[in-house]
Image (cartoon, rainbow, N blue to C red):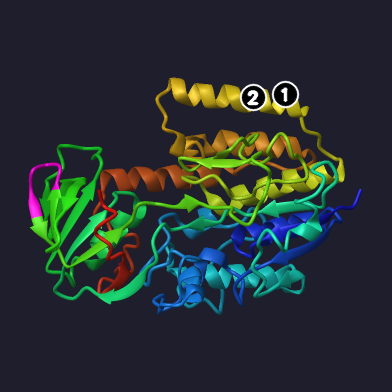
Amino acid sequence: MEKRVAVIGAGASGLVAARELLREGHSVVIFEQARRIGGTWVYEENHSGSSNAARNYSCHSSMYESLRTNLPREVMGFLDYPFVPRPSSRDARRFPGHEEVLDYLESFAVEFGLHGYVRFNSKVNQGSLKFLGLRGSLENITTVIPIALQILSKTSSSVSLFHKVVAVIGNGPSGEDLCSDIAAACKKVHWCAKSWNSLSEPLQQGKIQRHLMISRADEDGRLHFMDGMSAVVDVILHCTGYLYNFSFLDTKSYIKVEDNRVGPLFKHVFPPALAPSLSFVGLPCKTIAFPLSELQAKWIAAVLKGRASLPSKGEMANEVVDFYRTLEAQGVPKRYTNHLYLETFDYAEWIAKQCGGTCHGFEPWRKELCLSTLDNKKLNPDLELDSAHSRRRSSTKAIMFPALSNLV
């Protein structure tokens, strides 16, 4: 049966969701708040601004100028649309910059004729969703697929880091990448985190000094770290991850965000009480986002078509409860509920089986290349991403979060 489906967001997950829905014969419209496709991969030089519109738009993307992928392009690409250098490629490196990823998404949209289904400059709010039925009967609503909107918690602005003392908060991929990228331009980099995986690593490497988290901040810009040290800094960079926000979606409390856990969701996709009328694509993190979103979208499209079936609402709800209890027993914080890590591969295989037919999970070479990349990074944290290409270390701009009052 053909369904009328609204896809919210024309980023990577939204585009591949639309394609899979169209392949199953559904009627699709994509609502995109920006003027172009790409979602978080759209980089704007100037994110500053005093107006509400400027502040809202600055949070739409968390991109910074020197960002490069931390997985090889072959691993990142969709299953049937390889992310390989093309004649028009501006960046043929194996770990390309964000411009190349955006070009890839643009070419994907052109290849599958998706631009015609996008309503640009169409920001969704609760009022605009009334016609979809979300404020009416929850038993008879037009299908909506909200793509995970990952929004940084603070408004950002560009700032010169040349010869500045900078504090970087967070030791995830972005924190690590930014530290190495800005060190050449900065006078000193104080890199702090809640914990460090290896105590055997030197506390200081060149201009980069490692610390435990900030305990307090003084009005003169002096930061006090939990390791007993302190330093006066000029700029603070928050590389602390994302906050999920679905303020446009009124589900009458069927779905909540608690400590950054979006739930309850069956297999990170379907809210049991509203399935299959409402579903999420691209929500998990610490994973291989593009091809995983593709598999989730195939599953959703198959369910809506009637080719695949879901357990009963009660069975899905019970499985979610069991999943949460397992995480709690393992000591996993709520905020890590949607982190997949190495479970990515089994999860992808499970999703593929639900789709039926010739659908398959991740290819063995994709898994092997992904794992070898992660292992190499652990063994050689300072190794250049591409041996044939030097990283762009000349950048003197980054994302600044000047507010000190929210650090403690």
Q: Are marks 2 and 1 in contact (CB under 8 Å)?
A: yes
Q: Residue at x 22, y 73 (%)?
A: 161
Q: Is residue 59 above or below residue 293?
A: below
Alpha-carbon neighbours of circle 1 within 10 Å: few (<14), some, or many (≥20)? Answer: few
Residue hosting label 1: 315
Q: Quadrant of residue 199?
A: top left
326 or 80: which is nearer to us? 326
The picture places residue 64, in percent across and down from the top left corner, at 38, 68
* Number of on-image labels: 2
Q: Is residue 13 above or below residue 203?
A: below
275 or 395: which is nearer to us? 275
Q: Residue at x 80, y 53 (%)?
A: 133
Residue hosting label 2: 319
Secondary structure category for the residue under label 1 = helix
The picture places residue 27, in percent across and down from the top left corner, at 84, 60
Cα distance, mark 2 to mark 1?
A: 6 Å
Whether residue 262 appears in magenta in the rendering, the answer is no
* Residue 112 visible in this rendered orientation of the protein: yes
Q: Is residue 313 above or below residue 133?
A: above
91 or 178: which is nearer to us? 178
In the image, taking residue 327 as reference, residue 124 lies left or right, namely: right
The picture places residue 228, in percent across and down from the top left corner, at 8, 43
In the image, taking residue 113 as reference, residue 380 lies left or right, namely: left
* Residue 85 visible in this rendered orientation of the protein: no
Q: Quadrant of residue 232?
A: bottom left
Please state the extent of the stretch shown in magenta in the rendering: 225-230
* Three-letter residue code for mark 2: Glu
Outermost residue to the right: 1
* Three-letter residue code for mark 1: Glu
